[in-house]
Amino acid sequence: MGAILVGSESSNDRRVRWLADIVIIAVLFVVGARLRLVFPFNAPGASWVWLPSGVAVASLLLLGRNRWPGIVFGALAMGTMDNRPLIALVLGPAYAAGEALLATWIIARGGRFDFGLSTVRDVLRFCLAAVIAAGATATVGALNLTYLRHVDPDYGLAWATFFAGDVLGMMGLAPALLVWGGTRVSFGGTWRRVEFGLLLTASFAVGVLVFGQRWPTSVVLPIAYLSFPLMVWSAFRFGQPGVTAVTALLGTFALAGPEGKFDFAVLERETEKKRQPLADAIKAAQVPVEHVISVQPE
């Protein structure tokens, strides 16, 4: 009787933990989706950096593939908040969960997977899974945008947007979640921790100087090269935890850009200014040509 009671309690604990994981995954999915609003380089109906893909893959790898309902609920909640049509509310959660399940299935086919990504084989397996899963999702997602919802008339651009966004989301965010969430990260000794703090401080400073300022390229480029010794320092002294931490920190600054966003409007205006003289010259050349064409022979 006691054994049955213990087994019942264990089963209840597993259900509670499963439900808690589902809720956490859904919340993280929605948070990642809302962060896309920070990025100004969104295409219609898609994003060039889709963080929920990284959250989804890392969650299923760390917690188990039976946590896929968390992805569905997260995608459904996101679609509801965005007031998306019914077809998007159905397809969105389906291919969001399908992408993560496909990626984890491909990774599992290769045998035991090291969350610490300490071998080249595991890194290549993860990258291959991300590319294949993103390609499959992009095919369905672009069809949805182009032929069902008629949001983007260019299927090729829609496919490229979906593919790039999901790949960047998986390769940019998931490694840090896997390394820090799936392995026991510890830096023994006080001085070791102080050194890691100095590494993060230096990375923060370089990120601010390179991506957080509106300085001329001649000033920014020399500072940007400081990221290379930082990556070497993190790799040799702290391994994958250090590399993923520095990459995530610098990547955050790169995506946010100066004043919290890339000023693509300024870039577009500057590009238009450079194109204007050429456009004026072409128009000026067209005038005599049109005059000659318009002259009727006697």
Image: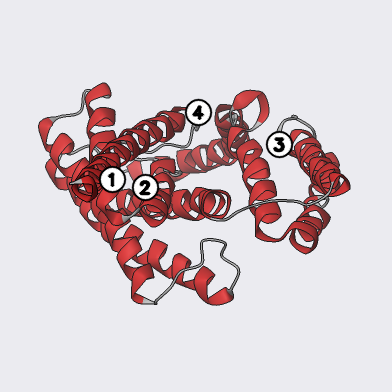
Q: Residues within 10 Å of mark 3 (few under 14, many from 20)?
A: many
| The label number, if any, that marks residue 56 in the structure image | 2
Q: Distance between the residues labelled 1 and 4?
A: 43 Å
Q: Distance between the residues labelled 1 and 2?
A: 26 Å
Q: Report which residue position mark 1 lands on.
A: 10
Q: What amino acid type is highlighted by mark number 2?
A: Ala
Q: Position of residue 148 (x, y in %)?
A: 12, 43
Q: Report which residue position mark 4 lands on.
A: 38
**Which of the two discs, 3 and 2, labels the residue nearer the N terminus?**
2
Q: What amino acid type is highlighted by mark number 4?
A: Val
**Furthest residue to the right?**
191
Q: Residue at x 52, y 42 (%)?
A: 282
> Which label sits in the foreground, 3 or 1?
1
Q: Is mark 2 on a helix, strand or loop?
A: helix
Q: What amino acid type is highlighted by mark number 1?
A: Ser
Q: Where is residue 202 in the image (x, y as percent from the top left)?
A: 82, 41
Say above or below: 217 vs 132. Answer: above
Q: What amino acid type is highlighted by mark number 3?
A: Phe
Q: Distance between the residues labelled 4 and 2?
A: 20 Å
> Which label sits in the foreground, 3 or 2?
2
Q: How crowded is mark 1: few (under 14 residues within 10 Å), some or many (20 or more)?
A: few
Q: How far apart are marks 3 and 4 (CA)?
A: 15 Å
